[in-house]
Image: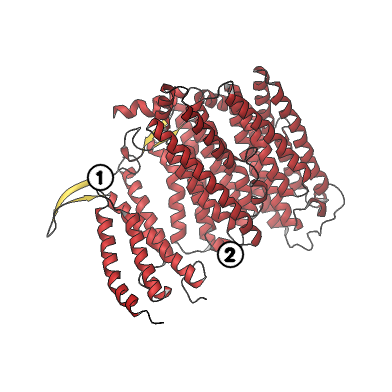
């Protein structure tokens, strides 16, 4: 594949979205085309990973403008991995959406919007230009605004309004910090910025911009104390959308954080470390406290998102190869497992007609397969070996101990226990016990539909198990990718080295 | 109320604004202008019509479905990017060529203009959709409303 391959994860969803707008809005065609396109997108992303592993960081000079003047797309181990995971999770969510999305939403451009969302996310992962990153954030946000409010139910509009407002604020701050950086450094290309920042050492303006960017990405990633918009707004849209938002959207913020801190600013031992480690710890604790207070399947899961973001920030704060590897592994693990758990909650809602844990019980008697899949997913989230969650946490804690960061390690371990507790709470109230919910007799979910609904869930749980069992390979990969991140010179060399020559 | 002056002047403005928007669209490659601003100008012409007459009349001036406009516009814009990939060049690369056309003399034909036309169509499509939605209180399709 020529470097143009890097444009494909953006171009393919866009072309698919356009085709879906232009073609008649017949549900079965919309479904078929999105399914094929997303599957092909996943294969392309896997091909990109292989290419990056074989040939090193790939760079595409869009429009043949040399860096640092034009926009570049950069594929390294981290960004291509996230593109692949994004497409994988998207495929599972689409599969679930085919079975559950109501015809009205399908007719009102659900599938094209989903493709545009994928385009925005892939663009954000791949771009090497900070203003372009802003643009991709806008692309994915606009698609997400519509997906969140599509259907126009009062609760959706109420929460959608807040979601739009908070993200507009974040985008404005993003724009301000990008202009500050541009005004100081005179460049928007991230590789070039890294070079310039190294030259101006300890410039207060750069420090301000770095904290502003932390706030911006913190709002997107829902870290403490900027998480407040998330738990309520993510439960508003239909199950498939919630699952995808919960699994993928906040991780774009985490990715952006990791990218700017590894490439541009670095994490020093003083202020930045203290800031990040407190954010990490408090996000973990506040998120998990939120889950303890809730008795609603979906809401527990949305609060978990915040707690899990804390683990990723912890990896970034410690800033050793091992810690970053743990953070990347954790991002990958959460994208898969979180989506799986949200899908499980969606299936449960279809079966029982409620997400309130007090109104359901005994699902294990009536639907053992769902119970088993949720059980495995929940244990994986809590970090029980040999599932994927274990290796993420293990790596992070090992890295923390190696650096002597005992406070955050203790928090991480403690929060893990509570995660397990909250998963057990769901399992105990909804799957064990007497059959109390108005059973399948009332809700006409026949056996075939139920079996089909488990398909995407089983796929994601299998990926999680696979990630854990194949830890030799997966941990090796994230370590390699962390080493790449901590050597910004590789990235800079790839972007500027050949760009200046051409 | 019969806004006679508005209606009469708006009839003339329609041609002037549309013509000027085409001018902006074509010159936009090397000088200020371009697809987006040209699209906005056409949209403002439509809004003027909507104010003076009514929304459905204004949108009937662009007799193409708004979804088709947006879809085609996006397709043209991405198409110029993808076309360069087919020639083995980087995504969104562009070419231009100086050529002699009858009456116009020497002109520069650039593939980037196709991109601009795509943007123009998207903006006009969105404007039409917005006018219709705001005026009729219905989303999604042209049809009897309110």
In terms of secondary structure, where does tag 2 sit? Answer: helix
Placement of the C terminus of chain A among the 4 image quadrants: top left
The chain under label 2 reads: A
Colouring chosen for the image of the structure: secondary structure
Query: How far apart, in angstroms, are the residues tagged by discs 1 and 2?
Result: 44 Å
Q: Nearer the viewer, residue A463 or B28?
A: B28
Residue in the picture at 27% in, 50% down: B32
Residue B83 visible in the current orientation: yes
Tell me, for residue B48, which label it has, or none. Answer: none
Q: Report the residue that reaches farthest toward the right.
A: A434
Residue A376 visible in the current orientation: no
Q: Residues within 10 Å of mark 2 (few under 14, many from 20)?
A: few
Residue B140 lies left or right of residue B107; in this view the side is: right
**Can you tell which quarter of the image residue A278 is in?**
top right
Residue in the picture at 50% in, 29% down: A207
**Can you tell which quarter of the image residue A337 is in?**
top right
The residue identified by callout 1 is B95
x and y percentages locating residue A141 in the rendered image? 52, 49
Q: Is residue B45 above or below residue A365?
A: below
Q: Report the residue that reaches farthest toward the bottom.
A: B1
Whether pointer 1 and pointer 2 mark residues with C-beta atoms closer than 8 Å, the reply is no
The residue identified by callout 2 is A104
Q: Nearer the viewer, residue B131 or A370?
A: B131
Placement of the N terminus of chain A among the 4 image quadrants: top left
x and y percentages locating residue A385 in the rendered image? 72, 30
Residue in the picture at 29% in, 65% down: B17
Residue in the picture at 39% in, 76% down: B53
x and y percentages locating residue A96 in the rendered image? 62, 52
Residue A495 lies left or right of residue A164; in this view the side is: left
């Amino acid at each position: 594949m020529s470097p143009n391959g890097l444009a494909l994860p953006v171009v393919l969803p866009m072309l698919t979205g356009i085709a879906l707008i232009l073609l008649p809005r017949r549900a079965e065609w919309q479904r078929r085309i999105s399914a094929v396109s997303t599957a092909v997108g996943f294969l392309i992303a896997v091909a990109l990973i292989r290419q990056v592993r074989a040939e090193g960081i790939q760079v595409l000079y869009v429009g043949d403008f040399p860096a640092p003047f034009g926009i570049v797309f950069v594929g390294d181990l981290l960004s291509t991995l996230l593109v692949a995971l994004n497409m994988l999770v998207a495929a599972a969510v689409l599969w679930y959406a085919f079975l559950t999305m109501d015809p009205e939403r399908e007719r009102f451009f659900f599938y094209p919007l989903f493709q545009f969302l994928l385009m925005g996310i892939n663009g954000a992962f791949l771009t090497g230009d900070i203003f372009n990153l802003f643009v991709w954030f806008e692309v994915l946000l606009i698609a997400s605004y519509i997906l969140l409010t599509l259907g126009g139910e009062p609760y959706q509009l109420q929460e959608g309004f807040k979601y739009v407002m908070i993200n507009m604020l974040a985008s404005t701050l993003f724009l301000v910090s990008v202009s500050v950086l541009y005004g100081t450094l005179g460049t928007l290309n991230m590789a070039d910025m890294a070079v310039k920042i190294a030259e101006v050492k300890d410039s207060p303006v750069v420090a301000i911009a770095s904290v502003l960017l932390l706030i911006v990405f913190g709002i997107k990633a829902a870290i403490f104390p900027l998480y407040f918009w998330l738990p309520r707004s993510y439960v508003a849209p239909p199950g498939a959308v919630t699952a995808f938002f919960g699994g993928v959207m906040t991780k774009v913020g985490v990715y952006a954080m990791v990218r700017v801190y590894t490439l541009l600013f670095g994490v020093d031992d003083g202020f930045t470390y203290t800031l990040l480690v407190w954010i990490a710890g408090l996000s973990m604790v506040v998120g998990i406290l939120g889950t303890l207070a809730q008795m609603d399947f979906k809401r527990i899961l949305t609060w978990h998102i915040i707690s899990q973001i804390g683990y990723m920030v912890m990896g970034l704060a410690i800033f050793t190869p091992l810690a970053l590897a743990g953070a990347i592994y954790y991002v990958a693990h959460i994208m898969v497992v979180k989506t799986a758990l949200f899908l499980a909650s969606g299936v449960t809602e279809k079966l029982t007609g409620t997400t309130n844990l007090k109104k359901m019980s005994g699902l294990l008697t009536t639907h053992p397969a769902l119970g088993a899949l949720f059980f495995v997913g929940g244990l994986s989230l809590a970090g029980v070996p040999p599932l994927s969650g274990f290796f993420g946490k293990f790596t992070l804690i090992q890295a923390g101990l190696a650096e002597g960061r005992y406070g955050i390690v203790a928090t991480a371990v403690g929060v893990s226990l509570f995660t397990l507790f909250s998963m057990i709470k769901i399992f105990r109230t909804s799957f064990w016990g007497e059959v109390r919910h108005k059973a399948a007799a009332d809700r006409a979910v026949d056996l075939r539909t139920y079996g089909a609904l488990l398909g995407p869930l089983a796929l994601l749980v299998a990926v999680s198990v696979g990630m854990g069992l194949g830890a030799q390979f997966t941990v090796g990969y994230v370590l390699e990718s962390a080493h790449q991140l901590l050597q910004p010179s590789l990235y800079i060399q790839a972007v500027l080295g050949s760009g200046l020559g051409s | 109320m019969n806004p006679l002056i508005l209606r009469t002047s708006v009839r003339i403005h329609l041609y002037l604004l549309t013509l000027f928007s085409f001018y902006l669209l074509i010159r936009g490659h090397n000088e200020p202008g371009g697809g987006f601003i040209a699209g906005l100008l056409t949209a403002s012409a439509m809004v003027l019509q909507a104010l003076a007459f009514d929304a459905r009349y204004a949108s009937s001036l662009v007799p193409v479905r708004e979804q088709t406009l947006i879809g085609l516009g996006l397709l043209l814009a991405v198409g110029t990017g993808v076309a360069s990939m087919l020639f083995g060049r980087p995504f969104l690369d562009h070419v231009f060529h100086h050529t002699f056309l009858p009456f116009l003399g020497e002109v520069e034909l650039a593939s980037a203009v196709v991109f601009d036309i795509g943007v123009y169509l998207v903006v006009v499509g969105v404007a039409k959709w917005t006018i219709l939605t705001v005026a009729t209180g219905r989303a999604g399709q042209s049809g009897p409303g309110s």
